[in-house]
Amino acid sequence: MEEIIRTNNAVELSVIDTRLTEAGIEHVVLDGFTSGMEGSIGAIPRRVLVFSEDKAAALALIEDVLKGE
């Protein structure tokens, strides 16, 4: 699996997670527990990983999310 984004923004992460699920792109969000345990000061961002073959589609989707589309 390959990382496609690393973020501390919970809203952005939620939208990305939902969009990837809707698009049928298997993914995993890592570091959620550790990020929550550190008190949400932003020291440990959460990472989203996808399979290599889905990376291009996932990155295109994330680009749309970050543009606000």
Image (cartoon, helix red, strand yellow):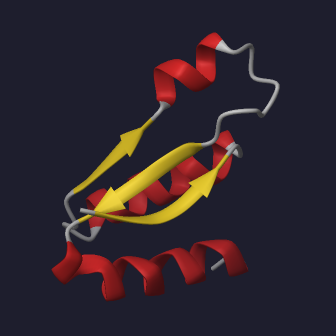
Q: Residue at x 49, y 59 (%)?
A: 16
Q: Is residue 36 above or below residue 63?
A: above
22 or 56: nearer the eye? 56
Q: Split into 4 quadrants, where in the image is the N terminus?
A: bottom left
Q: Residue 27 occupies which quadrant of the picture? A: bottom left
Horizontal and vertical percent for residue 26? 19, 59
| Left or right: 39 in relation to 44 | right
Q: Residue at x 22, y 67 (%)?
A: 25
| Left or right: 42 in relation to 15 | right
1 or 58: nearer the eye? 1
Q: Residue at x 60, y 25 (%)?
A: 35
Q: Residue 46 occupies which quadrant of the picture? A: top right
| Left or right: 51 in relation to 66 | left
Horizontal and vertical percent for residue 36? 61, 18
Q: Residue furthest right?
A: 41
Horizontal and vertical percent for residue 65? 59, 72
Q: Is residue 1 above or below residue 30?
A: below
Number of callouts in the render?
A: 0
Q: Split into 4 quadrants, where in the image is the C terminus?
A: bottom right
Q: Residue at x 57, y 82 (%)?
A: 64
| Left or right: 64 in relation to 23 | right
Q: Is residue 41 above or below residue 19?
A: above
